[in-house]
Amino acid sequence: MDPNITLPNYLSPMPTNDPRYSGLNYSAYQYAYGPNPGDGNLKSFQIVLFEEPHDAYRVFGHPASECGYWWILAPESNCYDTEPPVSSEAYMFEYFAVCSEWNSATEIRRCTIPKGSGFVVGIGQTATCADNKTLIPDQDILQLNGDVCSEANTTTTGACEVCKAEKDDLKLSACVKTCDDSNTTTSDVS
């Protein structure tokens, strides 16, 4: 666990006396933590609480399933600027170190995580793919590990939707919230 990860305002460290903490901590070390370069997963993490509802996104496609455990968090504004464009290739290889044999990136699922939810978030580790290419994820973007689909479906504010991934610019996919759509002026490039 890394208490030095900078968390956005909508997240806070989960207190260790929270009844969910031990299960999330176990899950983090068992499934999410990849301390060695090339392992993939997270090289550092924190167990957090959502202080307000916030969106998470999962790009998926064969063999990755719609409700897997690897997600990204929307920018702090909870919407994306439309510029610069982000292709599915850039998303997978440059931002999140997702090997092509793990995911064909044909669809996107967006879920709103309810306030009070607990998850593991962290910084991605490098991943070595089947072709021996090493991918390096963006070290400024938090990834999320956990069962977002189940958590989002526990309340009416935790809605999810699925859309086709626009390969040339994922931000143009129908289920991706852009700042233009949500009347938000806060800017974020990721």
Image (spheres, rainbow, N blue to C red):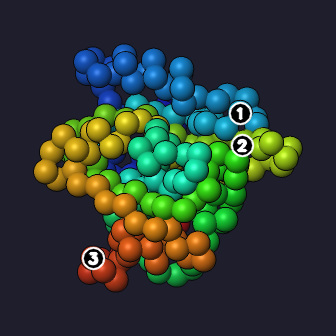
User: As shown in the figure, which amino acid type bears the numbered disc 3?
Assistant: Ser
* Residue 148, horizontal then vertical, whole percent: 35, 42
Q: Nearer the viewer, residue 42 or 99?
A: 99
* Residue 156, horizontal then vertical, whole percent: 13, 51
User: As shown in the figure, which amino acid type bears the numbered disc 2?
Assistant: Thr
Q: Which disc is residue 16 wearing?
A: none
Q: Nearer the viewer, residue 39 or 51?
A: 39
Residue 80 visible to the viewer: no
Residue 122 visible to the viewer: yes
Please report whichever mark, 2 or 1, sits nearer to the chain's N-terminal start.
1
- The Cα atoms of the two marked residues, 2 and 1, are separated by 7 Å
User: As shown in the figure, which amino acid type bears the numbered disc 1?
Assistant: Asp
On screen, residue 101 above or below 163: above
* Residue 39, horizontal then vertical, whole percent: 71, 33
- Farthest residue, direction front: 62
Secondary element type, mark 1:
loop
On screen, residue 76 above or below 15: below
Going 59% across and 36% down the picture, which residue do you hit?
42
Going 29% across and 55% down the picture, which residue do you hit?
160
Badge 3 vs badge 2, beta-carbon distance below 8 Å: no
Q: Please give the residue where the numbered disc 3 appears in the rendered image.
A: 182
Q: Please give the residue where the numbered disc 2 appears in the rendered image.
A: 126
- The Cα atoms of the two marked residues, 3 and 1, are separated by 37 Å
* Residue 21, horizontal then vertical, whole percent: 34, 21
Secondary element type, mark 3:
loop
